[in-house]
């Protein structure tokens, strides 16, 4: 069996002048891997992990590269070319992904970035993309839960935050008031699930939540102080933006972490800043 639009483990069956011809075990369908795809030579019987799609002549083709998303996944893609019938998107393999004009939520502009879901036309076995992702969000089955570690790819800025891809399978948002680092669209980050919403979207954050966040922030503050001679002008009265700039954390988290460090006698808090407590002071 061969899964179109997915990664498949296939075996080299034979070769021609231009192609390695691959097959799945006990499945007599030829899949063509262009020799131009690789500088390597593969002997008969060699196993390869390849992405399979159908070309314009209805022939199964293989790529040694995994695209940025397979069927059922989302990716942030840039439009290479636009035509009346659709737009071709860069998705990480030599063959661009077509987003037909009927599958564009708004007209796609050349050079611009979009959230694209990769789909399979089961009638033709052709892989295509769509920017009309709303119809998939409500019906999707979430295999994640609150507190889970996930990958987050910020895709588009919005009023409240960044529309993001969660594990490349779901759509969510990270909120401006919980972001304490520079965001680059399309760059994969680590984060956690905050809430699974009734509308199918996922609220996520780039840092762990609750007490675990405060515990981690204590270590961050101690490391920050140790690298600055044990002292800093920051304290619980500091401007939130200054705390964010220096430590990439909210003032609320900073104050909670300071309180815990002070109770443990790890730091001293002064009117003009904080400092690491000496061993003598810790033993008092």
Image (tube, rainbow, N blue to C red):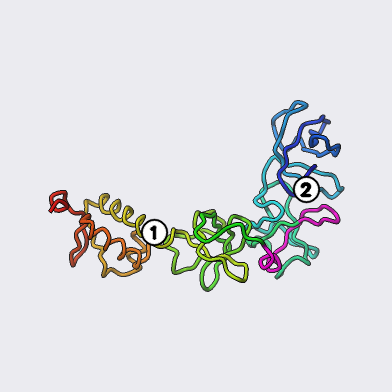
| Real-space CA distance between mark 1 and mark 2, rounded to the nearest whole angstrom | 42 Å
In this rendering, the label closer to the viewer, 1 or 2: 1
Q: Nearer the viewer, residue 122 or 116?
A: 122
Q: Is residue 112 magenta?
A: no
Q: Position of residue 38 (x, y in %)?
A: 70, 35
Secondary element under disc 2, as helix, strand or loop, is loop
Q: Is residue 272 visible?
A: yes
Q: Dot 2, crowdedness within 10 Å: few (<14), some or many (≥20)?
A: many
Is 94 placed left or right of 213 in the picture? right
Residue sitting at the far top: 43
Q: Which residue is mark 2?
A: 4
Quadrant in the rendering for residue 197: bottom right
Q: Nearer the viewer, residue 66 or 134?
A: 134
Give the magenta part as a residue range.
120-140
Quadrant in the rendering for residue 9: top right
Mark number, residue 213: 1
């Amino acid at each position: 069996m061969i899964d179109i639009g997915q990664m498949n483990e296939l075996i080299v069956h034979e070769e021609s002048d231009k192609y390695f011809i691959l097959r799945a075990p006990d499945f007599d369908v030829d899949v063509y891997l262009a020799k131009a795809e690789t500088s390597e030579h593969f002997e008969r019987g060699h196993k390869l992990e390849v992405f399979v799609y159908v070309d314009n002549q209805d022939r199964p083709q293989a790529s040694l590269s995994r695209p940025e998303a397979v069927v059922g996944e989302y990716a942030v893609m840039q439009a290479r070319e636009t035509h009346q019938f659709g737009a071709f998107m860069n998705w990480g393999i030599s063959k661009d992904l077509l987003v037909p004009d009927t599958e564009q939520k708004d007209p796609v502009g050349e050079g611009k970035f979009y959230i694209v879901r990769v789909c399979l036309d089961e009638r033709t076995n052709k892989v295509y993309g769509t920017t009309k992702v709303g119809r998939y969000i409500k019906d999707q089955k979430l295999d994640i839960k609150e507190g889970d570690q996930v990958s987050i790819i910020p895709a588009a800025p919005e009023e409240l935050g960044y529309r993001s891809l969660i594990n490349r399978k779901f759509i969510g948002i990270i909120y401006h008031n919980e972001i304490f680092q520079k965001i680059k669209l399309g760059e994969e980050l680590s984060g956690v699930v905050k809430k699974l919403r009734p509308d199918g979207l996922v609220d996520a954050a780039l840092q762990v939540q609750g007490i675990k966040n405060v515990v981690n922030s204590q270590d961050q503050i101690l490391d920050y102080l140790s690298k600055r001679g044990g002292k800093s002008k920051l304290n619980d009265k500091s401007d939130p933006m200054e705390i964010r700039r220096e430590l990439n954390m909210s003032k609320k988290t900073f104050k909670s972490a300071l309180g815990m460090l002070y109770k443990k006698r790890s730091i001293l808090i002064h009117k003009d800043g904080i400092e690491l407590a000496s061993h003598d002071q810790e033993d008092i």
